[in-house]
Image (cartoon, grey):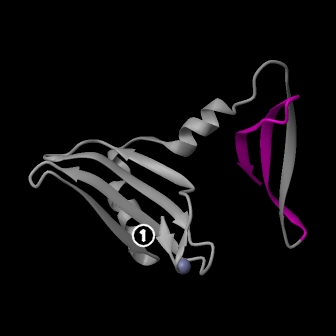
Amino acid sequence: MRHCNSVFSAEDIWFLLDKDNYTNRRIYLANCPICNKKIALLSFFDKNTNSFIEQYFYSGGATRIKEKYKKDIISTMLGFKYKYKAPSGFKYGINKEIKKNGKIIALKQYACDFSGNKALVKKIDV
Ligand SMILES: [Zn+2]
């Protein structure tokens, strides 16, 4: 992805369902490391024109494009990663308190294994 004259990789990629003559639809998501703007790159193959299209969206536009396309998600890169990194083998649980102004407002329960993998099991609002 590109912004501010720099090239950086996506923090997440959404793989979307094909729609009409649009295939290979993907949304690449990242924050620009220079200006920290939210960036979404929509890319797809357009069978009508036999061409590969890339469209950039920034800030509010990036948020809107995520809202618009999230119903079409088949899978996401982070989704796969989370699955892959899920704790395995012997597990233990830890609770983490979420505090606001010194008051506990929520409890997060994690399942952990001894390779340092951690998965959120439950969030309890207090
Ligand atoms: Zn930038």
Query: Which segment is the magenta one?
Result: 102-126
In the image, residue 19 above or below residue 27: above
Q: Which residue is mark 1?
A: 62
- Asked if the stretch drawn in magenta spans residue 42, the answer is no
User: Where is residue 40 drawn, in percent x and y?
Assistant: 43, 65
User: Where is residue 25 drawn, in percent x and y?
Assistant: 30, 49
* Quadrant assignment for the C terminus: bottom right
Mark 1 lies within 8 Å of ligand 1 (Cβ measured): no
Of the pair 112 and 10, the residue shown nearer to us: 10
Please identify the residue farthest to the top as the structure is shown.
Answer: 89
* Residue drawn at the location 55% of the way across and 36% of the way down: 80
- Asked if the stretch drawn in magenta spans residue 118, the answer is yes
Left or right side of 88 for 67: left
Residue 85 lies in quadrant: top right
In the image, residue 106 above or below residue 41: above
In the image, residue 44 above or below residue 82: below
Query: Please, what is the three-letter code of the amino acid marked with disc 1?
Result: Ala
Residue 84 lies in quadrant: top right
